[in-house]
Structure formats: structure tokens, C-alpha cells
Image (tube, coloured by chain):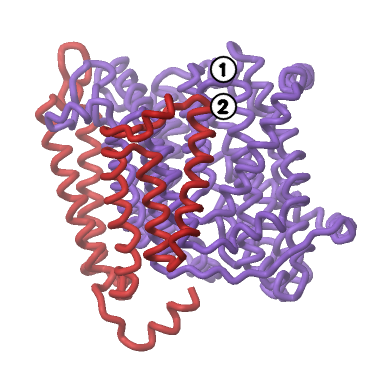
Chain colours: A red, B purple
Amino acid sequence: MEHDETSEGAARPGISTHLVEAAVALLLLAIGLVVVFEARKLGAGWTSDGPGAGYFPFFIGVIITISGAGILYQSLLGRNRSTVVFVDPVQLKRVLSVLVPATVYVLAISVLGIYVASAMYIALFMVVLGKYAWTKSVLAALAVNTLFFCMFEVWFKVPLFKGALDPLRFLGY
Amino acid sequence: MEEIGALMQGFSVILTPMNIGLMFVGIILGVLIGVLPGLGGANGVAILLPLTFTMSPTSAIIMLSCIYWGALFGGAITSILFNIPGEPWSVATTFDGYPMAQSGQAGAALTTAFTSSFVGAFLAVVMITFLAPLVAKFALKFGSPEFFAVYLLTFCSFVGMGKGSPFKILASMALGFALASVGMDTVTGQLRLTFGQPELMRGFDFLIAVIGLFGIGEILLSMEEGLKFSGKSAKIDPKVVWQTWKQLPKYWVTSIRSSLIGIWMGITPGGATPASFMSYGLAKKMSKKGARFGTGEMEGVVAPETAAHAAGTSALLPMLALGIPGSPTAAVLLGGLLIWGLQPGPLLFVEQKDFVWGLIASMYLGNIVGLIVVLSTVPLFASILRIPFSIIAPVIIVICAIGAYTVHNAMLDIWFMLGFGVVGYLFKKLDFPLAPLVLALVLGDKAEDSFRQAMLVSQGDVMVMFSNPLVGGITTLALVLLFWPLISKALAVIRKPKKPDEFAVERPVD
């Protein structure tokens, strides 16, 4: 955590933690209310053959709602609320630089299948974020995915998702 | 001593070349998982679970539990060499382990950590051998109110013993229960909380949640710090091992005290992290060299490592004997048992004798194999941490995606995994504990079933939870733990407040 201490002296830009916490609390409150509402609709009471389908979820929804309200109170009015910056722009950029490609990757899996998408993902990640040479990255990506292919399809006989286009059809697995 | 006989029977079941081989594979994979950022015991076992579907249950659980031991050992390597705790319970190991490595005693520190881990795990396994059958026999008499009371106790103890805001613990737990109730209701067959989406009918599998929350969440967190590893190199040669072993018996009191703390905290859920901190604090208070703790004292490595492993191992006792896991990893192992068609709980000891005793025997052997493997291969694993993060991160995300897909062969699960990853990142940053969420997701259905059955028996009267001394006792204990944050505040007003826990700040929420 050394790098936090150095950058905290100057006021870092960004949203403070207790506001993020309040947003999460509001979300929890909403989820709690949805669960309570749905549970009521399913029958949270006593039916002819015992407790209804919504009996248990009803209480769970109540607990979520109460704890959401509690967190909301603590985050906005509590004495120990944390005003430390949640993420600064640099950190947010770093996090998004993993999260956004990961989302694209999952999208690619559904079209190209796990092996092809993974190879492309690893190679591009290494080139773009790791600043590696193209040849090195492609070789590493191919090596990793050949290993996975042998491990899952050949040795352990666990077939993985081949995608809508199934580019690896010619291998016969 | 019928346990000894049964244990010998267990050894005869597992001592085949195939199983010993799987043990080595499991330990090596486990240490690898423990060393890599973003992969820990729980999601590592979750990802590798599908690989074992084609094996016999005994071989499968041997490999998986060995992965667990390996991950426990692996956490110590990163704490000592890199000052990065691989697992929450190895945070306390960094206090004295890293200073030891800085002063050139890395080999001694690692040997100390591994050996103490082994001692803690070994004592815990001995305890399981003799206590688990008794607990199982006792639990055979349990009815549904008793079982619900035990579930209640499990979850309330998170609130009572956890760190941080009790509301956050409650929220995380209830969210787990809510996610568990999505899908088909097991009793009435009604669809719950699916909002008309047919894909949601299957509900949320906890394995997906574990992979996303711990795996992807961890990667996002590490990425935020712009992680650069700078570590001490370590070589362990037999001379260092021998010299360290000669010194270790001096600390036998610390070892035994830490093991007892670990065993006690491990049986109650979520215990490994508090156990390691408690044991470190006590050792500091009671040792003659207490003042020098934090500067590279060997005893400061012995205490947390012994307790963490004793706790990690004893977490399997409630899983086996009651079907209630004490930690997320134990919960994943329980999920495995269910997939192989074994019903964990008291009946397991009656119906699946070979399996249970095979597993317990493999705990003995697995820890011995683990000690040998880690002592001989540390330089190899330390060098893995020198691989740049920009190679490791995409590979780990790929592994997580594969793991999520293989659980149900469903593409949608990979999206859920990504979603859980974001939740994991937010929750970790906001100090929401993740273990209650995972355990609630695993136990949700079963806890609900026992609750409904109990209510059916009593026709909706909640007082059934106090209908006899046993169930009443457990329920009362659970309620005390649930309201412990309030009770301790009230006590603090009456009595003079004690000196606050000096390690409270460092202790992670898990």
C-alpha cells in the first residue's frame, strides 16, 4: 500500500468512499424492496399445505432492506464514515483497462468459442497493455491455449464452448 | 478405538499409485493457485472442480483437498517473500515473515511457516479423526428445528465475530440467501425471482459467484494498485531446514496454543483470519521476546501460520459431520460432494465409510506430501511471481471464464461471473465481507428447507426454536452472537473500555 501514502498528501480527485457506499446502500434497499414485493406476490403467508414459496424470501428481503437502510445511515450520517477517495482517475483507468477488454472477451467467446477468443485476448492484452512484441505475445497466447486444449478436450475429456461459428471444427473435437 | 481401525481402512483405500499421484498434482496446483494473484483456495478449487467429474469421488476429493492444502501453504510464500498476503489469513504472517526475509533469513522464515502450518494442520486432523464421528453420531438425532438452529448459529456467528459494520455482514449474507432463492422452489415448484427470464430458472450457482467474486474481483483490485512485484529471492537448502527445525521445538507452547485457537475458531465459521490474528496477538503478549515481535521474530511466524492452518483444516469438520461448511473453500468442497451424489452430513459417516475415512486419511498424507513439495520447490514458485502481471492477468481471466463455463456448460454463466467480479471489487473496496454471501448462497436452499420443515412441524409457531434445551440453547447462542455488536457496546458503557485491539486496523474483512 506504499503508493497510497505518497499520493494521499495532495487532494486526490475522485468520489469519496462514503458516497459510493451510499449508492450501494440505495441499490441494496431497492433489491430488498423488490425481493419483499416479489415474495408477497408468490405468497409470503401460510398456504393450505404449509409455508408458501415466498415465506422465507420475504424475511430475507426484510433483512436486506433493513441492512441497506442501516448502511445508508452509517455512510451519510455515521461518525466513522470514510471520506477517503474511492478511486482516483488513474486507478479507474487501470481498472477499466481490464474490465472493458474482459467484457469484449466474453462477447467474443459467444461467437468464436473459448479457445480462439482466449488466444486473441491474451495476445492483445500483452501487446496493448504489456507493450510486448507481436511475435512474443502470439506465441505465448498459442502456447497457453494449446495447453488448455490438451488439458480439457484431450486429457480430462471436458468439452468447452466452441462458439456459434466454431472455427476449430477441423480438429474433430 | 474403532476410529483407528477405520482410519487404517481409509489408508488402505487411498494408498494406490493413482491416488498418490493425484495428491502430488493437487498440491502443486494448489501452491500455484495460492501464489498467483486472483486465484485463491476457494475459486481455485471451484475452477478445478469440473476436471474431477470423471474421477471416482474418493480420488476426486483427494485431489481437491490437496489443492486446498497446497493453497494454504502457498499463501505463506507470497507473504514472506513479497509482503503480499496471498490469502486474508496470511496477513499476520507478513508482520514477522517479511522482516525475516529482508534480513536474509528468507529460507528460515519459509521453513518455519511451512513446518508450523504442518503442525497446525496435523493437530487439527487428529482432532477431526476423533471428534467428527462423535459429532456426526450426535447430529443423527437432530430434527429440522435443530438443523435450522445450527444454520442460524453459523450465520449469526459471522455477525458476532466479524469485523466492521454488522449491517454490511447482514446485507452480504441476505444477498446470498436472496440469490439462492432465485429459480425453481424445491417444495412448491413455483418459479421465484426470475422476472420471467427462462435462463434464470436454474438460479445462481455458487461456484460462479465464487469464481467471479474472488477471482475477477481480486484481479480488478490488483490492477488498481498497478501491481509491481518486488520480492526477496529464496533458496531452501537442507542445511537451513535442519537448522530451523532444531530451533522450532523451543516454541512448542506457542504451537500448541495457536493450534487450539485455530481448531476452536475453525469449527465456528469464517475463523481462519481472526484465528491467525488472535494467535499472533496472544503470542506477542505471552512471549518473553514479545517486544521484538514485528522485527523478524521466528515465533511471530509460528503463531499465525499454525493457527491459520489449524482453522483451515478444522473448517472441514462441520462440513463433513453436519453438512455445514465453515469456510468458502469448505463450501466449494461441499458443492463437489453434492455433484458426485454424496449427501454431506451425519449420514455420510454411516453410509459412505470408505469415502469419509479415505478423505481423513488423505488429510494426513496430503499434509506430509505438501510439506515435502513446498520445501523442495519454493524457488520455482517464487519465480512465478516474477512473471509480469500483463501476462498473468489475462491468463487468469481466461482460466476463470473456462471454470465458470464448465460448471453447467452455460454461456450465460460467464456473464454472471463478470458481474460477480464487479460486485466482488466493490464489496472488497467497501469492506463488505464475501464469505457470508458465498456460504448463504450454498446453504440457502438447505437452510430454507429446514426452516420450512420446522415451521410445518409447529404450524408456524416460531417458539419451536425453543422447544427443547438443545435447540433452545443453540438458538439462544445464535441470538446472542447476532446482537453481539449491540451487547458489546452496552458492556463497554458499563465497564471501562478495554485497550482496543492493536491489530484491528490491519485485519482484513473476509
Q: Where is residue B264 in the image (x, y as percent from the top left)?
A: 61, 43
* Residue B373: quarter of image: top right
* Residue B36: quarter of image: bottom right
Tell which of B251 and A162 is nearer to you.
A162
Q: Position of residue A41 (x, y in %)?
A: 9, 29
Residue B227 versus residue B322 in the image, above or below: below
Q: Residue at x 22, y 68 (%)?
A: A19
Task: Sort mark 1 into few (<14), some (14-19) or many (20+) by Cα contacts within 10 Å.
Answer: many
Say whether marks 2 and 1 touch (CB < 8 Å): yes
Judging from the image, mark 2 belongs to the subunit labelled: B
Which residue is farthest bottom? Answer: A10
How far is the residue under mark 2 from the one under mark 1?
8 Å
* Residue that mark 1 sits on: B348
Q: Which residue is drawn at 77% across and 50% down?
A: B376
The disc placed on residue B320 is 2
Residue A146 versus residue B93 in the image, above or below: above
Give the secondary structure at mark 2. Answer: helix
Tell which of B21 and B263 is nearer to you.
B21
Does the image show residue B278? Answer: yes
Q: Which residue is drawn at 73% across and 29% down?
A: B20
